[in-house]
Image: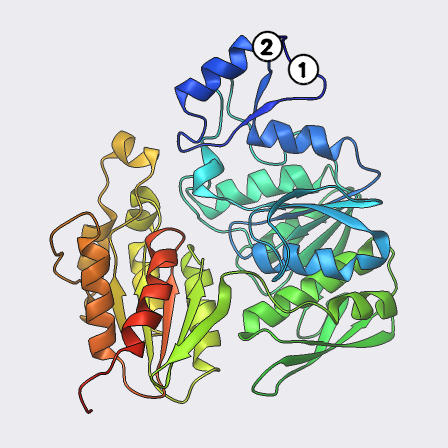
Amino acid sequence: MQPADPRTTTLVWGGHDAAVPEILEVATGRCLPTVSHSRAIELLAATMPAVVAVVGSHSTTMVAAALTCALTVRDPGWILTASPQGDAPGYDGGGEVLVVDLCPDLALHDAVPPGQRHRALGSGVHPAVTVVTAADAAPPQHFSREEALDEIEALARRSGSVVVWSEQPGCAELVERLRRRPGPRVVTVGRGPGVDVAVLGLLWSGEDHRLTIEAAGERSTVTVPVAGTKAALGVASAFAAGWALGVSGADLADGLAVFTGVERSLTRLGAAGGITVMESVAQHPEEIAADLQGARMLTEGAVVAVVEPVGHLRTAALASRIVQALNGADHTVLLPVLSTQVRAARHSDGAEALAHADRRGTLVIPETGPGPTGAEDAAVDLAVSLLRTADLVLTVGPDAARRIGPRLLAALDRPRPAQ
């Protein structure tokens, strides 16, 4: 078997044992170079005329996906973990600009091949524009807001322009840091006085948000079918990034006219028995709170959340904030914490931390049944028992929660006792 040409073929180490030893052995035998996820981003970014990086401790997904539509006139490519509805995540080559979501994904945090040094996402990338969505604690990537600010500031100072979502945690501190000494052009976006790209109007019709955005005296109107105030402001941040890149307001509005949201980011799976089933991939407490607020806007009934916390270390560290976010639901059915490699090293138990933090008794932990799907079976049965006609159930999480959504629809479609 001939060795592969290392200039054209590379194994990207994906984290969470995605590259199992057998695959690594085959790659080594074929002389394939093996690189980390962050190094792969750096190499791809270097091939593009311009890069727009979306970075933050949370809330990057909506901004990055909206950007791929906002920049249609520039024929964008992308590196995304979650795609606009109807598109595919992952890597897609483009023409003039590459949109990169540098989200703090637990699955990618330790994505470093054996023998290589960990590199923060975005290392070696020099974006034309960097969009900052938040700077907050998000273990294990950022154990404190200060750590998040240090890492994000380093990327910002390698950028031509920095767009900062002014109302998000840590963003005021970041703007202050960047303006202390000469550096990149800073563009703020949000509501209220003193921002460079201002959201003058934010109107919810019951089906979509209508935004009135002003930049350099030019007003544009954008209508997007996304629920939740944070989601709508994320779209405004994508608009601001396009404007900082030099795209006109008219072209940005035209591009965003086809944006319908992000796959599994407060998206509708279907309805059965008068109950709506939606799903979310939120992980950080700020993201969970935002999606529950959006869910409230879509129903006149109760909101029941079925939540799969991600990472024992993160869940333990942010337990009180997660529980506070979950108070946005009427009931929360708690799935087992999705394990990560970090747990074994830190010996933290996220489930116990959540239960301890829940002083109001709002979390419901189902008793696990037998078999490998016992926890999921019990969660489905419990959620169905809590739901009534006109309610909404939101599954939150990347793994078990993804499987539970369709199962809830099937269970709700079966005849139920009169309520």
In percent of width and height, residue 235 lies at: 66, 66
Instruction: Give the Cα distance between marks 1 and 2.
Output: 7 Å
- Name above or below for residue 273 compared with residue 112: below
Left/right placement of residue 76 relative to residue 392 reads right
Q: How many marks?
A: 2
Quarter of the rendering containing residue 153:
top right
Q: For mark 1, does the 10 Å Cα neighbourhood hold few (<14), some (14 to 19), or many (20 or more) residues?
A: few
Q: How is the image coloured?
A: rainbow
Name the residue at 81% across, 56% down: 244
Quadrant, the N terminus: top right
In percent of width and height, residue 200 lies at: 72, 79
Quarter of the rendering containing residue 387:
bottom left
Q: Is residue 115 visible?
A: no
The amino acid sitting under disc 2 is Cys
Name the residue at 28% across, 36% down: 343
- Name above or below for residue 50 compared with residue 25: below
In percent of width and height, residue 289 lies at: 42, 67
Q: For mark 2, does the 10 Å Cα neighbourhood hold few (<14), some (14 to 19), or many (20 or more) residues?
A: some
N-term mark: 1 or 2: 1
Left/right placement of residue 151 relative to residue 310 reads right
Q: Secondary structure at mark 1?
A: loop
- Residue 6 badge: 1
Q: Residue reaching furthest front? A: 1
Residue under circle 2? 31
Q: Considering depth in this image, is 411 or 224 the residue closer to the camera?
A: 411
Name the residue at 41% across, 52% down: 398
Q: Considering depth in this image, is 278 or 64 the residue closer to the camera?
A: 278
Q: Is residue 165 visible?
A: yes
- Name above or below for residue 271 compared with residue 286: below
Labels 1 & 2 near each other (Cβ < 8 A): yes
The amino acid sitting under disc 1 is Pro
Q: Considering depth in this image, is 379 or 145 the residue closer to the camera?
A: 379
